[in-house]
Each structure stands twice: as structure tokens, then as C-alpha cells.
Image (cartoon, grey):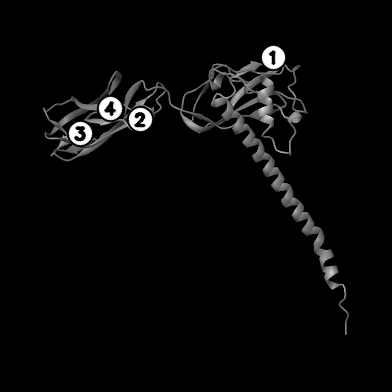
Amino acid sequence: MRREDGAAAVEFALVAAPFLALMFAILETGLVFFAGQSLDTVAANSARLIMTGQTQNMTQTTFMNAVCANVSALFTCSSMMLDVETCSSFSACNTSLPVDSHGNVATSFNGLVTLTLAANPGGSSLGGTLTVQAVNGVATFAGLTLNKAGAGYRFQASCGSLTAATTGLVTVTAGVATHVAVFVPPAGSVRTGSSFGLSFAAEDAYGNVATSYSGSVTLALASNPSGATLGGTRTVKVVNGLATFSGLTLNKVGIGFSLTASCGSLPAATTGLFNVTK
């Protein structure tokens, strides 16, 4: 009979190396994920302290201590770089920090830094001075503008052969409503007595729907070639920046009708011409 003593030990020796490699890879991936999540949590908690006004009476040291109190054992406070700025708007904040290989700001750096959009979900134009000279290692961009609302914008700062820096995600919201605009026009031809609809939008100066606006829009006939009567609900509430009219009727045929929508002090909007048939 063939002896099989030690077969299990031999088999384990064959699979031990890949098994241990797999286990270490899983542990390393878990540690990397945990480290990233820990830093995200520290940043979120620190931002919450500022947003809720808890830092108003803090000094730089006490705030740093509050941040470090949330740092996990994977990091030491001395190896962290904390940068807090006071900005009148996002565009006024510093978005580029040239650093050396140790993460320190290279104060001797005075090159030109150019800012571009790395992600542009709304098809916006980035306005303002997009190339500035760094001073003591810091390039400060002020007076920047974006003219299209959207979520997921990113800015990228580049400077010659230096590795470019990309910001986190930025959401651009619509400005204050400045006018009313036709959002969905009426059909080119409607029948007498048959219901039809259309919608208007409260827009900011750049044509973005001002979703925070909550006034009321009133509809009237701007052009009435046959003396028709506009039936249906002619005043509706604006919801998320839109005023939607449905169930409207006109009781006489004619060519060249148009409707106008007014909303308080905002400039009114008038539809294009449409016809009413039998």
C-alpha cells in the first residue's frame, strides 16, 4: 500500500502562498478604504463645526485639536495639513495649492496657474480671470462665474509640468428670477372648445430655471383676432420654477392667437402665434 502520511501538509504548502497573498490583499484594501472613509468623516465633521457656528469662539489651536480628536489611529495630527479659508463666495476661494513632495506649500513657487473646467455637466462657460500668477506658492482666483446651473462641476488647475489639481464636485444653482419665459409652447393649432396646455418658467438672468421661485403666474390673451374667450384656470402657482397650465380652451376660430404670462414685477413672456380651428 502507498503511504499518504504528510499529504495534507504538502497540499497546504502548495496553496499557502497564494492564500496568504490573497488575505493580505484583502486586509490592505480594507485598510485603504477605512483610511479614506476616516478622512472623509473628519472633513465632514469639521465642516459641520464651521457651518453650525461652533468655531466662532475657537482659536486656530483649539480648532485643530477638535479636528485631531476625530482622527483615527491610522493618521497622526502632525502629518495632516489643515486649510480653512473665509470666502465671500465659492469663486473667491483659493483653489490651487502647489506643494512639495512632502505636501508642504512651496512658498518659492511663483509660476502661472491656469484654471479650466474638468467636468462641465451643464455646458457652462467659465468666466473671469482664468490665469493668475502664484504668490508664495498660492494661486488665488477671484471673480469667477458659471452661467449654467448643474450638479457635478469640477475645476482643474494646471501649471506647466506640475501635476494638475482637481477640485471636488461643485453644484451651481440658478440665481434670482429676473423674468418669465415660455417653457413649453402651445401647439401650432388647437380646436375650438378642445383643451390645450402650455408652461412658463421663472428664469434667472442666464436662462436657468429659478427653482426656488414660488410666485403665481397669470395667463391672458395677448393677440385675439376673433374676440375669443380664454377658458380654464388662468392663474397657477409656480412649482420648482415652473407654472403649468392645462385644460385651457378658446371658443372662436381665428389665425394669429398668442398668450402672455405675467408674474408680479417680473417682465412678462408672450408665446408665438398659433391658430384655432373648428
Residue 87: in sight, yes or no?
yes
Q: CA distance from mark 4 to mark 3?
A: 12 Å
Please state the horizontal and vertical placement of residue 52, each as a whole percent of the image. 54, 26
Label 1 crowd bin: few (<14), some (14–19), many (20+), radius 10 Å: some
Chain-order first, disc 2 or disc 4: 4
Q: Amino acid at mark 3?
A: Thr
Q: Secondary structure at mark 4?
A: strand
Q: Tell me how far mark 2 sits from mark 4, CA to CA.
A: 10 Å
Q: Which residue is mark 4?
A: 216
Count residues near mark 3 (Cα–Cα under 10 Å), then give few for <14, some for 14-19, many for 20+. Answer: few
Query: Along the line of sight, which residue is nearer the eye, 60 or 241?
Result: 60
Q: Residue at x 27, y 27 (%)?
A: 217
Among the two numbered marks 3 and 2 on one chain, the one whose residue lies closer to the N terminus: 3
| Residue 233, label in figure | 3
Three-letter residue code for mark 1: Val
Secondary element type, mark 2: loop
Residue linked to disc 2 = 241
Horizontally, residue 158 falls left or right of residue 107, namely: left
In the rendering, which numbered label is found on residue 135?
1
What separation in Å lies between label 2 and label 1 (alpha carbons)?
43 Å
